[in-house]
Structure formats: C-alpha cells, structure tokens
Amino acid sequence: MAATDLLPALPFTKPPTWPAAVWVGDVDVARLGDGTARLLLADAAGYCRARLLVRNGQDLLGFVEVGVDHEQVDASEVRAAVSRLHLPPYSPATPPTRTDGLTVVVCTRDRVPMLKVALASILELDYAGLSVIVVDNAADTDETRRYVDELTDPRLRLVVEPRPGLSRARNAGLRAATTDIVAFTDDDVVVDRYWLQGIVAGFNRGCTVACVSGIVPSGELRTPAQAYFDQRVGWSSSCTPRVFHKDSPPADVPLFPFQVGIYGTGANFAVRRSVMFKLGGFDEALGVGAPTNGGEDLDMFFRVLDDGWQLAYEPSAVVWHRHRADNAALALQARGYGLGLGAWLTKIALNPRTMWFAIRTAVAQAPHFVRLSYRMSTVATPPVELSEHLPARIGLIELMSIFKGPLAYRGARREGRRATPLWGR
C-alpha cells in the first residue's frame, strides 16, 4: 500500500497535551485513490483523531473526522465518511474572470512571528496582478517595518497607520490600494492556495456583489480552548455557497439581515473599493484597538446589504485560522466578541431607520427571535467534556460583555472615532 503525506493546515508549533486533540488538514479526493492507501500525516504525534477538509480541486465537499493510527489514516475510512456527507446540490466555484489586479491587506501590530507565517502563504499565491499591503498599526516597535523592508518581493509594501484601531488600519489599506477588489485577512492565518481564485469567483456569483466572505476553518485543535471556539462560531464549516440580498430574505435566516454571524468574519473577506468609499469606509468606533474591541466586520457586512448590494459567501475561498490556544487569551477574546456585538447593536439602535427596521424584523419573527436568543446562550455554554478545562462561566463572559457594548461604543465616539471617515475622498 502506498503512503501519502498530508501536511497540517497550519505550521507545527507544539505537540498536543490534551487527549482529545484533533489533527487538522485537507485532502483532495484524487489522492484517496481506490481507498486502499494509508495516508501519512505530518506532525501527527499525539493525535488520535483527524479532521480533513475534503475537496475536489478548488471546490469543497465538506469536513470529515476519522481515526488516526500510528500517525496515519485509512483512505477507505475517509471515503466512507465522505459518502455520509449530506452534500448540497453541486455548485462549483465560478471560473474567475480577468481582473485588473487584486490587493491583499494585512493589518498587524507588533506580531511579527505570526505575520511571517501569514505573509509567506500570501506571497506563495499564484495570481497575476497581486499586490500586498501590510498596515503597521500603532506599533510600539519598528520590528514590523524592519521585517517587511528585508523582503524583496516587489508586490509587497508597508503602510503606517499611527492611530490605533483595526478599522483605521483597514481604511488605510483601502486608501493605499489601487485595485477595485481589496481582500482582507489577519496576521494569524494561513491562506489556501486557491484563496484569491475563490474570492474572484464569489464576485462572479452576482451582478451587484460588493463583498465576498470565505470560510475560516479551525487550523489547529490542539487545546480545549481552541476546541471550544471551534464549536462556538458559525463561519468555520459551511461548504455551501450563498448570495445574500436585502430584497430576497432567505427563509432559513429569519432575522435577516441582522443575523450577521452567518455572513463571515473579518479574517477572510474582500470588498469592492469603490463601494467602500461610497459607504464611507469602516467605522472607526468599532474593531480591535478601539474601546469596543470588535464588530467592524459585522457592521460592514450589514451596511453592504442595507445599501442594496449583494454579499456572497464563497467557501472555495479558504483561510485557516489559529484560534487562541490558552484560557487567558480565550477569555479575552470572548469579552471582545461580546463587546463588539453589543457596540454594533448600539449603533443599530441609535439610528432611527435601522432601529425600526430591527424592531419590525424582531416582532415579525418573534418565535424565531426567542429561539435564536436561547440557542445563542446554549452554544456559548461549553459541553461537559470541555467545561472542566475552560475558564469558569466562559459562555457567560461573552454574553455579559454584550451589555457593556453601549458604554464602549459611547467611549469610542467620545475619542473622536468617525463613523464614515472615507466619505468625500
């Protein structure tokens, strides 16, 4: 039997010490052969289970979990697991049309070790007309600047945004870009080799698509903190393409367009630069680095839809994310997510038009609103097998932080952070 090496989704850092840790990677169906092979997993010591994203070239079929035996998995077991997937009607990624280039923006602040990994994956992409902008946001050191200066890739340049805030950094990237399609990702990720082809395919799924978000799977499940976050988010597993539009509310999204968690996340999305200037750019009061500590991506997704544009979810645009591995970082992240959501809801409530739109939606969908609220609180509660390894009341930390969002939003506005800083530019 032939052995085939599969690499982990993210570069190896530390071996697992948690017995339920899961090795994560991807495999093309063509590599499964006739099912008689045993697939050798790189850096799999200590893992008893593997999660594989199964794909057919650029198109995703779904995720399967199989057993690991002596750092190997059976191709036949993978094939059997794939056969049990409830695959949606086949919707291949639209072949990309020619574009006049594309810009990738990575916003960072004093995290060079992570940035090196992310940039390496981006600069390995084969895409004509690619430009890469690193936005150095309110850095305490010159380490990021020195690192980028050392790189000789002509596609790469550094932009400095001295004022703290992820929204300000994203706006700086938009101002510096010269292409109409601008893709954003974080500094703690690895992008897939087909990422940009997927982004462009997403824009081809509708005539008025102004924003494309992609799937952000967990790239590492080495610790209980990472496993909890993995089961907590909704943008890490769906392999079904979708196009959202304000005039066509989806039947399975009763609180549309306010059910923002289904659209994607800030680690993997792209926008039309021209539309972003029309909308005024990212709200400076939202996002990491502001008192609200999040919500700028949710806000932009909503504003794109609210302005009448289409938003496409394109799973073939894959970005692997390294979730917080320790409990202290997880608790900090939970607070940030809650604050950001609460701040964005405050912004909705302070605008009479969106406030009444939200009230009408909630009243019309009252049973769904109650069920969704209950489900949110339930999902935030970790399962029994994880709870003993996590911070006490981790779910409550995030939920209670939502109620602190209004004060955080008010504080951000008092700092002079503007809602539409790119209007008129």
Image (cartoon, rainbow, N blue to C red):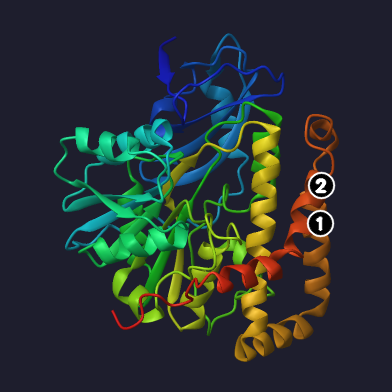
Q: Callout 2 environment at 10 Å: few (<14), some (14 to 19), or many (20+)?
A: some
Label 1 close to label 2 by CB (< 8 Å): yes
Task: From this view, report whether residue 102 is shown above or below residue 60.
Answer: below
From the top left corner, tell me how far across and down residue 65 is, in percent.
62, 31
Front residue of this view, candidates 136 and 100: 136
Q: Is residue 193 left or right of residue 251?
A: left
Q: Tag 1: residue type?
A: Ser
| Residue at left offset 40%, top offset 79% | 279
Front residue of this view, candidates 225 and 346: 346
| Residue at left offset 36%, top offset 41% | 57
From the top left corner, tell me how far across and down residue 257 is, in percent.
60, 76
The residue indicated by pointer 1 is 377
Residue 94, can we see it? Answer: no
Q: Callout 1 environment at 10 Å: few (<14), some (14 to 19), or many (20+)?
A: few
From the top left corner, tell me how far across and down residue 375 is, in percent.
80, 59
| Residue at left offset 59%, top offset 79% | 249
From the top left corner, tell me how far across and down residue 174 is, in percent.
31, 64
Q: Is residue 278 left or right of residue 378?
A: left
Quadrant where the N terminus sits is top left
